[in-house]
Amino acid sequence: PTRLIIDTDTAGDDCFSLLLGLLHPRAKLEAVTICNGNVPFEQQIENALYTIEVAGRGGEVPVHPGCPRPIMGRWQAATMHGSDGMSEAGFPKARQRPESKHAVDAIIDLVMANPGEISIIAQAPLTNIALAFLKEPRIAGALKHLWIMGGTDNQVGNITPMAEFNFFVDPEAAKIVLGAGFRVTLSTWTLTLKSGSLPADEIERIERLDTPLSRFFMAVTRTPRAVALRRYGRAISTHPDSLTCACALDESLILESDDVVVDVEVGGETTRGASSVYPPRMVERWPDRDANARIIRRADTKGFADMLVSVLA
Ligand code: BDR
Ligand code: CA
């Protein structure tokens, strides 16, 4: 199995990435770490704990709260998942409580105790990962793989015209992490729109399952589905985080990818948090910059939907 830490700002699709980590036969989720991001920090902790309970794994996977604020960013809640991040579903409080050990230390300890064994799915602003690297730089070599959901493929963003939410909230952290020497795969918002958006018939397939987890899916995605319909004019459900986790669990879902140089804009008035992805043929113009990530350009939407359905069933 793939031994995982999921670093999450649990709201909306973050939950389904957690469900894949908790329930997919190929995954062994060893810890959940919480980072600032989508909704107020304490709420994100509760959302993660409830998701673990709904998966029937309450008390089995530790949840470590991390950095409640970005390094330099001005945190602002994402509105598309509702004020609680769960489409105001009114879920009860989970029995499991968070650990007292800080996420940064949990990441360092797990990775350093198991060199070459642990992969991280980073599906929130990168504050926790950046601070873990600054505290213990050897994690860059000891981590098996870092799967990052963030940025765009030189395309429009989802929080400003130029920036994707996770990179926008903490661009300094993203820049530190991308320059740290981790083995990185990048799953962008551009990829979400191309390959990680479930069409109406897949959403209906999930609804028809009528299991506790399919009902959880329909409830949690209610507000983001309404936002997507307004924004994109189509009844779709967007899955940036769970698509990233799915690709980590089954790399055959990655249909096209390239080794690229990725950087993040930390200045900029209208461009702060924007990612720049240098196409391979241009990298020779920046000879001091080696490829620092594999970017996923296209993924298997049907295969991803099948994986999600198998877990929700
Ligand atoms: C990312 O931003 C957050 O709102 C989502 O949880 C996802 O990780 C998409 O841009
Ligand atoms: Ca997220």
Image (spheres, helix red, strand yellow):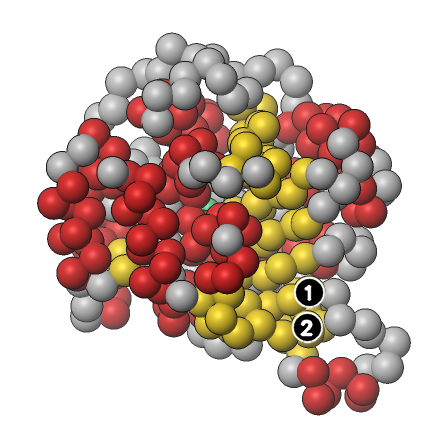
177 vs 286: above or below? above
266 vs 44: above or below? below
Q: Quadrant of residue 107?
A: top right
Q: Secondary structure at mark 1?
A: strand
Q: Answer whether labels 1 and 2 touch (C-beta < 8 Å).
A: yes
Q: Which mark is residue 293?
A: 1
Q: Secondary structure at mark 2?
A: strand
Q: Position of residue 20 (x, y in %)?
A: 42, 40
Q: Tell me which residue sits at (16%, 60%) in the image.
A: 201
Residue behind mark 2? 259
Query: What kind of residue is marked 2?
Result: Asp
From this viewpoint, is residue 310 visible?
A: yes
Q: Quadrant of residue 186?
A: bottom right
Q: Tell me which residue sits at (54%, 32%) in the image.
A: 29
Tag 1: Cα neighbours inside 10 Å, few (<14), some, or many (≥20)? Answer: many
Does residue 187 appear left or right of residue 195 in this picture? right
